[in-house]
Amino acid sequence: MMLDYPSLLLALGVSAACLMVTLFGTWYSRRTDSFLLTLVISLCLIVAGIVVYSRFTPQSGIAPAAIAYALLMGGFSTIYAASVQFRTGTPPWRLAGTLFFVSLALGLPLILVGLDGLGLMILNVLTAILLVGTGCQYWAARREAPGPLLGMVILYCVSGFSFALCAGVLIADGRLSLGEPPVNWAENLNIGICIAGMTGIGALSLALHQWRMAALHRHEAMTDALTGLLNRRALFDQYGGRRLNASTAVIVFDIDRFKLINDRFGHSAGDEVLKLFAQDMMAEMVPAATAARLGGEEFAMVVGEVMPGRAERIANAVRMRFAARDIVIDGKLLRCTVSAGVSVGTPEGQPFEAVLNLADGALYQAKDAGRDRVEIASYLRAIRPAPDSRTSA
């Protein structure tokens, strides 16, 4: 036996409430993806709207319809704002508020003057637009997690289409005043699709959250927490198995007398110097380049598509920028310098580790020659130990 309309509404409300509790628990456990909290708030409004709408009867008057309209439009506006928040990271409340007040202006006055049928037509049309728009926002962000996001796009668009069907049936019926909720095949189909859609969207939202958490953990594992550059592991994962040709260079930087900075001013001052040097490296980066912190005060830059002498000019630009920087520690002006070694791959290709070791050997030469300078590796020179096996100078 088919369920009657009030029973379907109850099932929809229970489904939305369960999804709301699940998403809240997921957000509360980590409090990272704030768009989940925005979805929880939207579902809270929608559940309240469904409960109030179920009280809309010929005896109740238009008050439940008006309140339900406001709650539902607030909920669907917030769902759209959550998708924009997911894609852009911007706070959702200004957008949600703007959409909410626009939707109120379009439909609520009609319900208040007794044209509840026309008001419900507008509600269904606006909801369809918001849900399809939500799907479009997730579609625009699909590269982040193609599987879950494609599923969410489909479910939001199908749900939006079901609301458009409801609007179409009401328009075809032509009654501007109803006095009670419309009951027809489109409404029943809409509720069924929304129940199934909420289940699917909930599961995919959780999968998306897990996808993002895994990506965050991968990023943290490959990033130097202090400077935001790649760490040594990430650099070797990217280049460790590659052979570098004559158009690719490796530059190794080492901050001069860094131990003295730590001893005199403390490790917090040393950390600040490291962060400032990382900024100077990034300021001189070219498009085909990768920067990393190898450890301690040692950094590396891999530069691709370089012409002869280009890597040396980049290294000198970083060196001069850092030397010209005024660093204020405890009210005292500190000037720091950096030395660098440059090595270029060979026409036949040379393993990344070998090119890195040659650049490190050239760095030794710069240190021995007085620091604050750039030296170019000579392939006739014996290869020195790898960067992580020597002490800071």
Image (cartoon, rainbow, N blue to C red):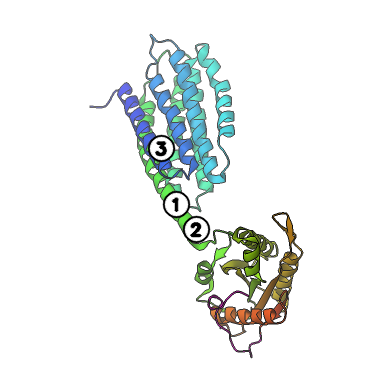
Q: Is residue 139 magenta?
A: no
Is residue 72 placed above or below 360 in the rendered structure? above
* Quarter location, residue 302: bottom right
Name the amino acid, label 3.
Phe
* Quarter location, residue 327: bottom right
Q: Residue at x 42, y 46 (%)?
A: 151
Q: CA distance from mark 3 to mark 1?
A: 16 Å
Q: Earlier in the sequence, mark 2 or mark 3?
A: 3
Q: Which residues are magenta?
A: 378-393
- Residue indicated by mark 2: 220
**Residue 347 in view in this figure:** yes
- Residue indicated by mark 1: 213
Name the amino acid, label 2.
Glu
Is residue 335 placed above or below 35 in the rendered structure? below
Q: Is residue 388 magenta?
A: yes
**What is the residue that sits farthest to the bottom in this orientation?**
380
Is residue 313 placed above or below 381 in the rendered structure? above
Coordinates of residue 126 in the picture (x, y in percent): 52, 29
- Residue indicated by mark 3: 24
Coordinates of residue 380 in the picture (x, y in percent): 64, 91
Q: CA distance from mark 1 to mark 2?
A: 10 Å
Name the amino acid, label 1.
Met
Left or right placement of residue 3 versus residue 286 in this view: left
Left or right placement of residue 119 versus residue 280 in this view: left
Q: CA distance from mark 2 to mark 3?
A: 25 Å
Eye-nearest disc, 2 or 3:
2
Q: In what element is the residue under mark 3?
A: helix
**Magenta stretch, main secondary structure class:** loop
